[in-house]
Amino acid sequence: MRWAAMWSRDAMAATVHFHTCPLCEATCGLEIAVADGRIQRIRGDQEDVFSKGFICPKGSTLKQLHEDPDRLRAPQLRRDGVHVDATWAEAFGEIDTRLRGIIAEHGPNSVGVYLGNPNVHHLAGVFWIRPLLRAIGTRNIFTASTVDQMPRHVSSGLMYGNPNLFAVPDLDRTDHLLILGANPYVSNGSLATAPDWPGRLDAIRARGGRIVVVDPRRTRTAEAADEHLPIRPGTDALLLCAMANVIAADGTVDTGDVGGHLNGLDDALAAVAGFTPEAVEGATGIDAATIRRLARELAAADRAAVYGRVGVHTVPSGTVASWATDLLNVITGNLDRPGGAMWGQGAHARRAPATGGGRGYRIGRWTSRVSGFAEVNGELPVAALAEEIETDGPDRIRAMITIGGNPILSTPHSDRLDAAFDTLDLMVSIDPYVNETTRHADVILPVPSALERSHYDAAFYNQALRRVANYSPALFSTDQPSESDILATLALILRGEGADADPSIIGGELLDEVLAHAIGDPNGNVGGRDIDELRGAVTGDTGPDRLVDALVRTGPFGDGFGADPEGLTLQRLIDHPHGIDFGPLEPQLPGILRTPSGRIELAPVEIVSALPALLASAQVAPSNGLRLIGRRDLRSNNSWMHNVNVLVKGKERCTLLISSADAAARELSTGDTAVVESRVGRVEAPVEVTDEMMAGVVCLPHGWGHAAPGTRLSIARQRPGVNSNVLTDGAVLDPISGNATLNGIPVTVGRA
Ligand SMILES: Nc1nc2c(c(=O)[nH]1)N[C@H]1C(S)=C(S)[C@@H](COP(=O)(O)OP(=O)(O)OC[C@H]3O[C@@H](n4cnc5c(=O)[nH]c(N)nc54)[C@H](O)[C@@H]3O)O[C@H]1N2
Ligand SMILES: Nc1nc2c(c(=O)[nH]1)N[C@H]1C(S)=C(S)[C@@H](COP(=O)(O)OP(=O)(O)OC[C@H]3O[C@@H](n4cnc5c(=O)[nH]c(N)nc54)[C@H](O)[C@@H]3O)O[C@H]1N2
Ligand code: SF4
Ligand SMILES: [Mo]
């Protein structure tokens, strides 16, 4: 426990703790005052090296989440359709018998796993799930990545040989930023970790830079930009290819320092040759002259970056759009250069420079059973989960494990998945709530709150705008098992070692893996050392903490277990409660590449071969029908924070935004109830007429729809909203990455 300055008046006798917010990707520092074991106040940590006091309305609600009476403290067993408290021994015993029974009879693929978004926001999720998956041995792994960023993994995998290399826009040093399909004023940024995106964007403009936002809706980010260009949903890949085409046609391609590390530049430019501005203006709704101007402004800018997110990834051309984003950064000389798009560097991520290339990246190593969808990153498209449960035959999914996910609200065609979950022989959920998904579970294993665990943002520091490291100890202790111990116990059960096996066995194995890898790297700071010696020197009270110590000590700034006494250790992080800033990003080419050639593959066949069909799609006249897109709200976090009263009170937020022209044509006014129908579903939602929306596009947020029976969400249930994923169509995927289509859904809208 850390003792710091006391706050006067209201927080008398309070101890002040510093904790990194784990809720979204921004990693803001929080200052949390605790007195008599209760949280008095949470505010932004002014001294945090990265966030400098910035906080959003969700940050302070870690208190409400921690105290929420609906948050489960005891395991739940479903008896006669009702969840009842059980002991941990009963819950694990039930899993041991039933899950192992199903695997014994039907094989490991009869178990499906769904992993949700919160897993990337804490250490147990990042490191302890892999041993569990290995112990199950199933290929039926599904995650929220295929309703999110899978296109970016695939384009990075194919171009750089590593699916986790996301170049981030260097906001603090750029002069020109083109944002497509992202609303960081509200989302606080994604695949580009930076607390206070709004402040950083404002700073670009304050220093004379320019921001252009491409989005069918005039969002807060668009409003704060120099220019907003509405675009027809799902057509950004066309726009981006056309911009590359213009730069090539103008002869202004300038790859800068990246030029020496490229394969396939000519092929990539040839592949976009047909994408003239005239060829795509009809489909995108952005006229040819504007496309030319956008491309020329980008090429002419001193330091520029193109950045796309959810709106361009969750569409059928998501992988092409992600590739074209990077292609533009390359041909304007902005990849891997300050002020352009650069790769992050976590203090825990040892990166051995590749010598002579890596193993490369492959997709489709196996396929899904029913529709033959390709494997990507070791998983299958979640849009195909329902059919894998419904369709009889060997390897049908009979049991599901969901971990930190709410696929009933977050994945397409969710009514179908809801019905499929009802037919399972067994469902186990690791989750703090009985919600729309876990209500189906036979066993729910609750996890401690975010303040009852330590935190180090292992996933997001690798894609952060600065090289920062920050460790937060747990604020509170708890009698509940930690999430890492729950995951470890499940793994040990499935390995046949029983529910009573010591969960620290798994932590020990993970630690040895980290140490062995580091020792095996001759250029690393512990190359060739003795594993017993290093293991004996690792510090930390818990498995996750010991892992952090090993990772940061063998990382780029680490002490190498004594090799550099000034270097980073867990203890040094503990001694710096506001974090440590190792400076801005630095160029990392070519050592960061893992392609077999050791070069950037600018024209991967999987992507280039998709371009003719994409171009042909631009020639089909756009339909007059309405298209549905989604949105986020500052006070939401996907589906799971609507049980916090301060975040949901006030005006109804789950509304259908519609332009005045489209509303008038349907005789709809604000406050009316509209019926929205798609190929797969139908919902009713209150109408909000607004000229934020471009004509032809309507907008409904996801993550709502809390009226299902059998949940335990007393606040959320009072303002349920409707589930927009009842409307999204699981049959339309990005053919390259298997990502779901969540934006640009054809719908009809009428009066209820
Ligand atoms: N407050 C809040 N913050 C969050 C979350 C949250 O739920 N609430 N969720 C977190 C998560 S999991 C993620 S992945 C990130 C996502 O972060 P962002 O990607 O910034 O999130 P969105 O706000 O969904 O922005 C997507 C934008 O794409 C636009 N759009 C839709 N279709 C298209 C299209 O075809 N083309 C273009 N150009 N634009 C389109 C939408 O209008 C919307 O403005 O946010 C994270 N942060
Ligand atoms: N239509 C539409 N659908 C979308 C999107 C969209 O823009 N439009 N966005 C998509 C995106 S980007 C994402 S990331 C997905 C999110 O999809 P999911 O990850 O499936 O959904 P969440 O709402 O994040 O649900 C998180 C679950 O984790 C639980 N949880 C919270 N904290 C913890 C924890 O510490 N440990 C454990 N074990 N559980 C915890 C919560 O109770 C909840 O059940 O939704 C996707 N769905
Ligand atoms: S922006 Fe994200 S990390 Fe920062 S306080 Fe809000 S939820 Fe937490
Ligand atoms: Mo996400």
Image (cartoon, rainbow, N blue to C red):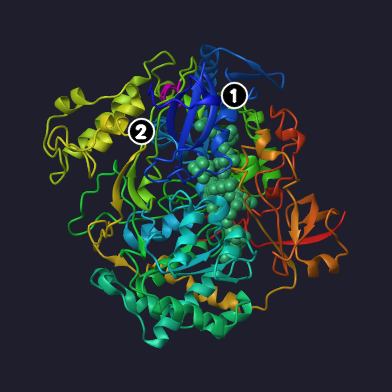
Residue behind label 1 places its C-beta within 8 angstroms of ligand 2:
no
Q: Determine whether 369 is above or below 590 in the image.
A: above
Q: Which mark is residue 20?
A: none
How crowded pointer 2 is (Cα within 10 Å; few <14, some 14-19, many 20+) is rated as many
For this rendering, which residue is in front, 185 or 125?
A: 185
Q: Which mark is residue 67?
A: 1
> What residue is rendered at 74% in x and 73% in y?
624
The residues colored magenta run 482-490
Q: Determine whether 1 is above or below 187 in the image.
A: above
Instruction: Report which quarter residue 75 is drawn in.
Output: top right
Q: Amino acid at mark 2?
A: Pro
Location of ligand 1 given as a quarter of the image: bottom right
Q: Is residue 484 magenta?
A: yes
Residue 358, percent across and down?
25, 55
Estimate the spatial distance between the alpha carbons at disc 1 and disc 2, rounded to whole Å. Answer: 24 Å
For this rendering, which residue is in front, 323 or 105?
A: 323
* Residue 182 in sight: yes
> What residue is rendered at 64% in x and 66% in y?
216
Mark 2 lies on residue: 577
Q: Secondary structure at mark 2?
A: loop
Q: Quadrant of the N terminus?
A: top left
Q: Secondary structure at mark 1?
A: helix
Residue 540, percent across and down?
30, 24
Residue 279, percent across and down?
56, 83
Q: Say whether disc 1 or disc 2 marks the residue closer to the N-terminus.
A: 1
